Image (tube, grey):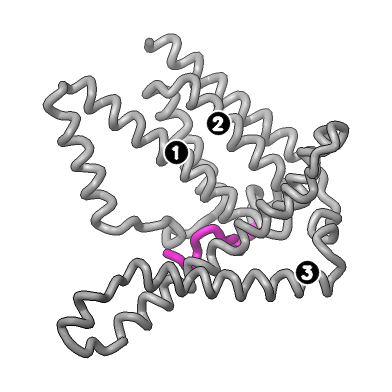
Amino acid sequence: MSTVLLREVPVDSVVHRLWAGTKMIAAFGISLLLMFLPSWPVLGVITAFLVLIWVLARLPLGAIPRPPWWFWGLVVLGGLINAPIGMKAVLGYAQIFVFGLVLVAASFLIAFTTPMGEIAPALAKLGAPLRKLRLPVDEWAVVVALTLRGLPLLFDEIRVLRAARKLRPKDNLMHRAADNPLIDILTACMAVSSRRAGELGEAITARGGTGMLTAHPSAPHRRDAIALGFVVAVCAGSVALSTVIG
């Protein structure tokens, strides 16, 4: 899963050609809709819409993250905890779970269809009005972009550290008792992250500083307006359906 998590899947599709800011605006609009109206009809329409976007993006099924077994065990445990309260509580729990899955799926669709180099310019473009308030928009955009770029590297480092730790021989029972895998991996990750951050800072400085990350030309096109109009129509249709059914 870590090999594709938060990384672009290089496929030529109409979704990949959309401006990064358009995808972020669409995800933000869907989040607002679900925040104020998380009904089952709205969740169903938005889920079908995300499936359609996945098909249009021509993403392989192998890109879908596969949570470990204990994740689904915790989900079932949460349902069992709510079961004694009543079916209404179980349905509310399921509604919140689907709500979270929809938001995560929308985030993954942005990551799978957008090069990381386009995130910072798009954020800087969207936050341009805030510059009038003397807010550090470019710096914020760079921080978000570098964080998204660094997360897959950190996941890969954790995977390598866990594999290396499993190969380490265990001397005796006292050593096993004093061993703390979580502390060891976190300490190693902090050390690796600090080293990578220093190397990344030196590379950015050698290439002209952080301003170069947001200086890339980034602007929406006609297809972006059409895509946003389609998203607005889907959201409005889901609200209308929820009103009729509700």
Residue at numbered disc 1: 102
Determine whether label 1 and label 2 are within 8 Å by CB: yes
Residue 10: image quadrant is bottom right
Element on which disc 1 rests = helix
Q: Position of residue 240 (x, y in %)?
A: 50, 14
Q: Position of residue 54 (x, y in %)?
A: 51, 48
Q: Which mark is residue 78?
A: none
Label 3: few (<14), some (14–19) or many (≥20) C-alpha neighbours in 10 Å = some
Which of the marked residues, 3 or 2, is nearer the chain's N terminus?
Answer: 2
C-alpha separation, residue under disc 1 versus residue under disc 2: 9 Å
C-alpha separation, residue under disc 3 versus residue under disc 1: 35 Å
Which of the marked residues, 1 or 2, is nearer the chain's N terminus?
Answer: 2
* Number of marks in picture: 3
Q: Nearer the viewer, residue 2 or 243?
A: 2
Where's the N terminus, which quadrant? bottom left
- Image check: 152 left or right of 209? left
Q: Position of residue 161 (x, y in %)?
A: 41, 77
Which of the marked residues, 3 or 1, is nearer the chain's N terminus?
Answer: 1
Residue at numbered disc 2: 30
Q: Position of residue 170 (x, y in %)?
A: 23, 87
Q: Which residues are magenta?
A: 1-12
Amino acid type at circle 3 is: Ile
Q: Nearer the viewer, residue 90 or 178?
A: 178
Residue at numbered disc 3: 204
On screen, residue 89 above or below 245: below
Determine whether label 3 and label 1 are within 8 Å by CB: no
Amino acid type at circle 1 is: Val
Amino acid type at circle 2 is: Ile
Residue 141 is covered by the magenta coloring? no
On screen, residue 149 above or below 106: below
